Image (tube, coloured by chain):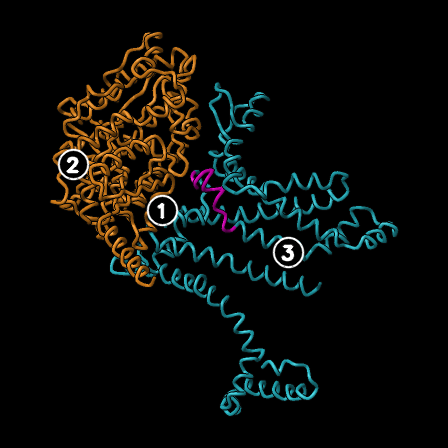
Chain colours: A cyan, B orange
Amino acid sequence: MAAELQPHGGQDSRRRTHIGKRIVVGLDGSVAGRRILKSGRAMARWFGSVRWNSWAFVAPALLLIGFFLVYPTIMTIIRSFFGRGTALFGPTVEFVGLTNWKYVFTNEIMLTSLRNNALWAILFTSCTVGFGLTLAVLLDRVRYEKLAKSIIFIPAAISMVGASIIWKFIYAYKPAHLAQIGVLNAIVVAFGGEPVGWLIQRPWINNLCLIAVGIWIWTGFCMVIFSAAYKNIPRALLEAARIDGAGEWRVFRNIILPLLGPTAGVVATTMVVQVLKIFDIIYVMTNGNYSTEVIANRMYKEMFNYNNYGRASAIAVVLLILIVPFMILNIRRFAAQEGAR
Amino acid sequence: MRRALLVLLVLTVVGVVGFADEMKYVTVMHGWPGEQAPAFQKIVSAFEDANPDITIIVEVVGRDRPALLATRLAQGNPPDLTPHPWIGTMKQWADAGEIVDLTGLVDTSDINPALVPIGEYDGGLYGLFIFPNVKSLVWYNPKEFTANGYEVPSSWVQLQALSQQILDDGGVPWSIGLESGAASGWPGTDWIEDIILRTAGADFYDRWVAHEVPWTDSRVKYAFEVFGELFLNNYVLGGATGALTTNFGDAADPLFLSPPAAFMQKQATFINGFITDHFPNLVAGEDYAIFPLPGIDPNATPDGSIPLLVSGDVVTVFNNRPEVIKFAQFLTSETAAGIWSSELGELSAYVDADPAAYANPITRQAQEMLLNATVSRFDGSDLMPGEVGAGIFWTGILDYVSGIDLDTVLSDIEAVAQDAY
């Protein structure tokens, strides 16, 4: 093998023929392949082959993914057809058919969860992407760009739970004649209003308040990605358009936006994947009470609070099914973007 | 040289084997991150002093203990012993054969006989009720009561009249805190349970907890309505939103503002710790005091006594080894109970607990109530399956208080209960 790698002219021609034989092994397999593998030398060559090497390199990753991702996924799907209990399988777990699936798509609290996840997906994604894009373009023209961007990016560095606790204080409610400790209600009261139970008022105020927290955390992330993409646009292109008499809006609409399109696609799908599995904010701030339930929080409750692994599995699979198309879209877009580079 | 090494090796092996043979370990998981932890540690030390061959390994899990315990159980690695309040879950463990039936293993003669049955299930003894709490208590500020000429009510009618009087005087009678993070709603379940005991009686209560009567039963509905009246009559600080957003641990605070923002709060004995933590200068018995929540319907409690709602932690054993049983037995002893109550001022399940031994007059009063109660029942929500008692019952309270129609709330709970029992 080592000899093979030496770049001598004579061996070089031999290598070419070996590669040819390897292709024979690879393509038609049986007869030609077996004949070649009979000799030890050929086997050694096969072990040095591109195909073997690639399998050897991929194998650890495949094993890990298989064990930690594929196997649990399959087990979860199977478990979703079995009843309550914490055992994976066994005498205490009974087969219930589609009962869990019926629950997932007919139970009122699950329908609320699905509705809220849709609300999150639409509002959260459009706001984070919209604000991120706007900020990236606008801040490019500000003298204190770095400072401003750092401040907007800071929430991304706070853990979701930490941010949720901060916002729980911001939304805090105290009865009218007591001192308000929540910033938002303090402002409302200062202007002569009645304090509002921000996290209690269903179904819109509390859900919007929760989504606002998510937007606060993730806008900075979107902005940074957009900013990097924006700075990659050749300045000459924008200059040329301006010299040709295009107004700023025209430049943004017809040049910047199309060029940022692929980036927006990746950012948007990333945000959708983020938001479909949203858990922390809900768990910390309302625990899904007052019609704020989401799919992931429901799954946690069914699994850990109610010991119903069957239902939890069905909910988990629903979450998976919802997320997979966006993951595929995301990977495709990302690949396309990389390819274009 | 080689011989010396050999000798050393032999000595090491003997040492390790001998040591492993002598020292036994008991793992305990508890959920008391606060002031109870050092008190429990003192009980552990007392046991270890008496049994030098046994080491207790204590693991404190403050949050999400049910989740952690469920995963540990699933992987076959539970602690040897745990004190916990989840009687409903304990029954599921017993059904699954995951916990030890202590009948004949642990002598329960040191436990208050009224409290022993709480740990019994299906003919077996699966929990030792050692750490009790009394729930049916109303906390008030005696100085403010005196200043305003209010008297401690001894009947429900008097309690209502007092509430109305406070309201008419421009005050707020009740402070209620239903918020408790992921467990929000549970303080309301105590209200419903106390009211059912007082309107429908203990027998009905047992049947309701066992789901032998549906949630849509008129007597259950009536209990919710009695609770709801507090809100409809504007008796609650901040109204529904105030109750829903106030943390249970902060709900006593308004009683001690000047002027007080509210005059009464219903909560279990443990709230004592919150009050002294938030207001270290307050003196128990002088600045704050308790009275039992009065009876409502005399027909529900024929002997005229006041029903007592209790809760607390029972000790459940996962692994049947002599040293584990020995520690469980020790926890029932007078020594352990003495440490617990003297360190914390907590109530004691010890059969001959002496109320007079308590320095805190409130604890003394609660201990007397515990010893003398003719009708006492364990917190029903802890007895129900998790989906109901730690799920839809909690959220049902929140839904009802936040204005959802009561019939809808009760039929929602009933639907889950149908499925869970």
Q: Is residue B262 magenta?
A: no
Counting residues from the N terminus, which is met first, the one under dot 1 or under dot 2? Answer: 1
User: The numbered mark 3 sits on a residue in which chain?
Assistant: A
The answer to whether the residues at label 1 and label 2 have Cβ atoms under 8 Å apart is no
Q: Amino acid at mark 1?
A: Ala
Would you say residue B156 is visible in this rendering?
A: no
The answer to whether the residues at label 1 and label 3 have Cβ atoms under 8 Å apart is no
Q: Secondary structure at mark 2?
A: helix
User: The numbered mark 1 sits on a residue in which chain?
Assistant: B
Give the distance between the C-alpha atoms of the residues marked 1 and 3, in whole angstroms.
Answer: 38 Å
| Mark number displayed over residue A63 | none
Q: Position of residue B314 (x, y in %)?
A: 23, 38
Residue at x 71% of width, y 63% of height: A341
| Mark number displayed over residue A265 | 3
Q: Residues within 10 Å of mark 2 (few under 14, many from 20)?
A: some
Relative to residue A169, is residue A245 drawn left or right? right
**Does residue A99 sit above or below B86 in this rendering?**
below
Q: Secondary structure at mark 3?
A: helix
Q: Amino acid at mark 3?
A: Gly
Q: Secondary structure at mark 1?
A: helix
Q: Residues within 10 Å of mark 3 (few under 14, many from 20)?
A: some
Give the residue number, with chain letter if any, for mark 2. B116
Residue at x 17% of width, y 39% of height: B329
The answer to whether the residues at label 3 and label 2 have Cβ atoms under 8 Å apart is no
Q: Quadrant of the N terminus of chain A?
A: bottom right
| Mark number displayed over residue B67 | 1
Q: Position of residue B219 (x, y in %)?
A: 24, 33
Q: Quadrant of residue B300?
A: top left
Q: Which residues are magenta?
A: A276-289
